[in-house]
Image (cartoon, coloured by chain):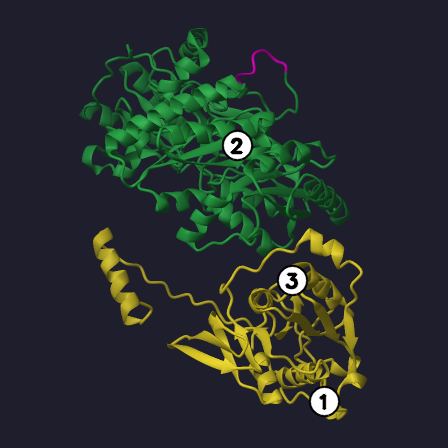
Amino acid sequence: MAFPYKKMDEADFDFIRSATSPDRVNVGAEIASEYYHDEMPNYGTFPPELYVEVESKEEISKIMAYCNENNIPVVIRGAGTGLAGGANCKYGGVMLSIMRMNKIYPIDHKNQTITVQPGALLLDIQAAVSAEGLFYPPDPGEKTATIGGNVITNAGGMKAVRYGLTRDFVRCIEAVLPDGSIERFSSNVVKNTTGYDIKDLVIGSEGTLCVVTEITLKLLPAPNCTCTLVMPFNSLEECADMVPKVLELPFVPTAIEFLERELIDIVERNLKKPLPVSEGEAVLIVMYDASSQQELDSAVEAAAEAALANGAIDCCIADTPERAASVWGVRGGILEGMKADSISQEECDVVVPRSCIAQYVKDAKRIASSLGLRVEPCGHCGDGNIHTEMLRGNDMTDEEWESATGECLKQLYALSKQLGGQLSGEHGIGNGRIEYLKEFVGPRMIKLYKAIKLAFDENLILNPGKIIEFNE
Amino acid sequence: MKIIVCMKQVPATSQVEIDPETGAMKRLSSNTRTNPYDLFALETALQIREKLGGTVTVLTMGPSQAEIMMKDTYTMGADDAVILSDKKFAGSDVLATSYTLAQGIRVLKGADLILCGRQTTDGDTAQVGPAIAEHMGIPHCAWVSEILDVTKDAITVRQNLEAVTQVSEMHYPCLITVDKDMCVPRLPSYILKKKTADRPVKYLTFDDLPDQNLSRYGLTGSPTSVARMFAPPAKDSQVYLQGNAEEKANQLFQTLLSKKII
């Protein structure tokens, strides 16, 4: 089975129409081109043969069983906000949208959990939870992403420093396996040593192992108070060196980000969003949450004193929602600002040990400039996940741009590996980084990956050609 | 260059409580914040001081809890902060408020430039700034969206007056009220916070003001009577555009054009 996959015919279309509803199925040219790719079209743009919007796990089960039997690939799509070229039909077949499965069930207060369907949007879940004084912390920038997408890519985001990743908040998962069977991985329990931890394997598997149909999430009491500090420094090195100092304090920060002046200027120039702190060549942004004002004040004072003792020009305090918004608005505008400032961009999402951030940033700039590229490192300093954005110069030809970015990525991944880091911190492998993974993790690990994939999906019908490639 | 910035502490919530008896706003809530428009005025003042030198004094009328706001202005860089506080000022409308502030400015021996926010988020009248200028007999420009030039003798501003945009030059002394988003207010500085921790906030009471005619202040000096305050009813008419994307875009364009929105 598997390669080559079956080309879908009218009988296949009819089966899926009958298993769901004809008005929820599009085929061929009826399928809008936005379903050919995720947020990164350059990481893979492929037309599906059929697009279906499912409404229940039973429909998914029928479709999976049929496709498994008939050697038709299936790719699951949420809101399409992924940044790795994961949700595209690289080998044709079915694109299965879970957007209609967006129920948010009432909060289970006794267990402090909420159960949701995969198509529920992160912003809707966060709103439902906060209306009852609770808090779902994972906060990747993209709030219109689905929770299914967040779980299947193990989304991180800025608040990972204090609260962790999506994985840390998933209690249990219900999923349809490629053969159509419906299974639950773990249950609404706090600990579990019952056999292999399949739940944690499924989280972050980028839709290659099973189709998530229901998720139970752990919740926390909402913090009452929050404050964001902006620490301007004369150099990026000083700024990066401050990160371990912040982490050594007896208060756990919620987020630590850094921005260089050049990037701040790009956002101001293109989006008219100036940072309310004009000093410094680089700034460290540190956010604290607390359950009382007193606790917050202590954290702010300790961090501000530490900043001044370590060469910060000042420590600016964004203590109101408006002030915090004026800071985070600039941070949130980076991607848009860079898109407006250059004709093409390529991104590297490495994660390095927090102790190596300054070293990585310095070397990344050296590598990029030796290849004639503009590079803007920014990102989640608190967890070492540095988004290294490469910007295309106006005078570069397509060939020059492609060969320079390819070489730059290769060297940046080697640098990350040398520093004890990883290839991707939160965006994943998908189709976009697949060519670099093999070398990064080595042949033994790829063999293990393949064995895991086959244990779930022996016919290789679920999101084929992502993370690992069998068709070689 | 002597600059005075008039500021106000407003309820932190947009759900303002109105006293049903007097129609006046209830201000007892402990949850307050600085009127956001006033921070744009303060930032503008600080930028002018950076360019031309001088002092920035913040003036407010209100109870002593306004001290929190005044201390906050010190951490942004204000030189002085003065609160006009007296039970005799309670219940002031636009007329009495602006008169009291103008009296306060006289006590402070006037200013070259007075700045206010365009309006407050509780009263929303946008009249206090211009009324201060009238009481003082000085020129003013309201709804300023941009400072085009500022020198030791005069200020040139752009006013966004909805239907027209006007550029005006005024010689000092004069007053401007600034629109939101004309700048981004700087953040409080921890260094300044420590430096100004012991700097006092000054108080002025009725007894300090030159005009001792009580009928100009507080509820008695306030001819405004608010009959009723209510939230406007939400419009429930919706228009659905039909057709493909291009047709719908065209219809939307025509609709916006006919309503003079674009």
Disc 1 secondary structure class: loop
Share a chain, discs 1 and 3?
Answer: yes
Compared with A196, A93 (above or below) is: below
> Label 1 is found on which chain of the structure?
B
Left or right, A293 with respect to A54, comes to right
Q: Which residue is mark 3?
A: B12
Q: Position of residue A228 (x, y in %)?
A: 63, 47
Which is more N-terminal, label 3 or label 1? 3
What range is drawn magenta here? A193-198
Q: Position of residue A266 (x, y in %)?
A: 43, 47
> Label 3 is found on which chain of the structure?
B
Looking at the rendering, in which quadrant would you find the N terminus of chain A?
A: top left
Residue at the image point whose x is 68% and y is 39% from the top: A310
Disc 3 secondary structure class: loop
Looking at the rendering, in which quadrant would you find the C terminus of chain A?
A: top left
Share a chain, discs 1 and 2?
Answer: no
Query: How busy is the neighbourhood of tag 3: few (under 14 within 10 Å), some, or many (20 plus)?
Result: some
